[in-house]
Amino acid sequence: MAEGSSLRTPAAQGSSAGAPRLRNVGIPLLLFAVAAAVHIGSNPRPPGWYKHYVYQAVAFGQGRLDVRGVPDFYQDLSPFEGRVYLPFPPAPALVLMPAVALWAEATDQTRVAQLLGAVNVALMWALLVRLGFPAPVALFGAVLLGFGTVHWSAATIGTTWFFAHVCAVFFVLLAWLEIEGRGRGWLAGVWFALAWLSRVPVLLALPAAAWRLRRLGDDRVWWFAAANLAGLILFFLYNAARFGDPLETGISMHTHAAHFTEPLRQGILSVAHLGRNLHTMWLRGFEVIGSAPFLRPSAEGLSVFLTTPALVRVFAPLTPYRSCHRILVAAIALVMLPSLFWFSTGWVQWGYRYSLDWMPLAVVLLALCLRPAPTGLDWALLGLSVASNALGAYWIRVLGW
């Protein structure tokens, strides 16, 4: 492998086997506990609305693909030939099936999201440690994902659209941990397929994942590709069984809020949406109000640099960019591409939720840019990121999101 092509830091070359128990078990458990407390404390009494995936999980448990008993006020439903389906991939509903087996439609999707989001924080730490980053960098990355990005608000809210993002992050991290661990191509492929079956744009990170597996041998890559091909075939069969067309997900016929009527006239995916999405992702600011806290979020979203200012450090790395940096940048760009042409910027959200499709990649990229250790400025940027998302947690409660 060419010099500089490895994601692993020098510390990873043989030291991880003797890592202290505290690093491998104690710190992840502590991160999980803190994140769970923060998520639940930010939304202690979820209203229980918009839990589409609970109804889908109930349907799967009963051997059906259509959803029944969905409240009348629900949007994002796809009526077809007298039945109602969801226009979303199925993996988040699979995540809920164990809970639904116990509590049926009373399952609290938000609570599951809050706990799963806390698991993601611990997994982010574990991934960075497995990649060989020193403890300060691993802690920086885990705290950043958990409390310095819109992952905090997504896990706290836990309604349908946010739950899908939390699931996608969970499966991406599991896939990456397998790739950097035992490297079983089939298992990494299953985890990765479940990631993009939660959020389809994640599929475009597949070449980067295959690149990492290739260091262990081409056979691992073939198993990885086979698992994802199986996922794609199952997804096509799932669509065909519902709508008679393997490429029809239901999004073309879904019910939607009046807010989307005009954008949808321009197409579900269209270059006409590019300007609005770019503006929201990179430039959209707060609305100024006359009372504390004086800043109110736009329902369209906010610039990722306002919600996660620590990301600016990827433009000023402590060490020069190498091939591993460039591959991560390419993967991030590919994953964000579909959202740039999508008819919606996310809507009624803190920040820009579509950034969670590529945020785990960005956290690892940032960790590479912080080597050998975060500076005082880096910690200050992390503090600003956490403060920004704490403001988001406040507005979630005030605005009833």
Image (cartoon, rainbow, N blue to C red):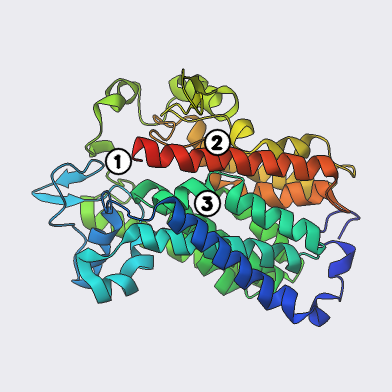
Q: CA distance from mark 3 to mark 2?
A: 11 Å
Quarter of the figure that contains the N terminus: bottom right
Residue at the image position 55 percent from the left and 67 percent from the top: 33
Q: Nearer the viewer, residue 214 or 101?
A: 101
Q: Which mark is residue 203?
A: 3
Badge 3 crowding class, 10 Å Cα cut-off, few under 14, some 14 to 19, many 20 or more, is many
Compared to 19, does 111 lie above or below? above
Of the two numbered discs 3 and 2 on the same chain, state the one appearing first in sequence. 3
Q: CA distance from mark 3 to mark 1?
A: 18 Å
Q: Is residue 112 left or right of residue 123?
A: left
Of the two numbered discs 2 and 1 on the same chain, state the one appearing first in sequence. 1
Label 2: state its secondary structure: helix
Amino acid at circle 3: Leu
Label 1: state its secondary structure: helix
Q: Which mark is residue 251?
A: 1
Quarter of the figure that contains the C terminus: top left
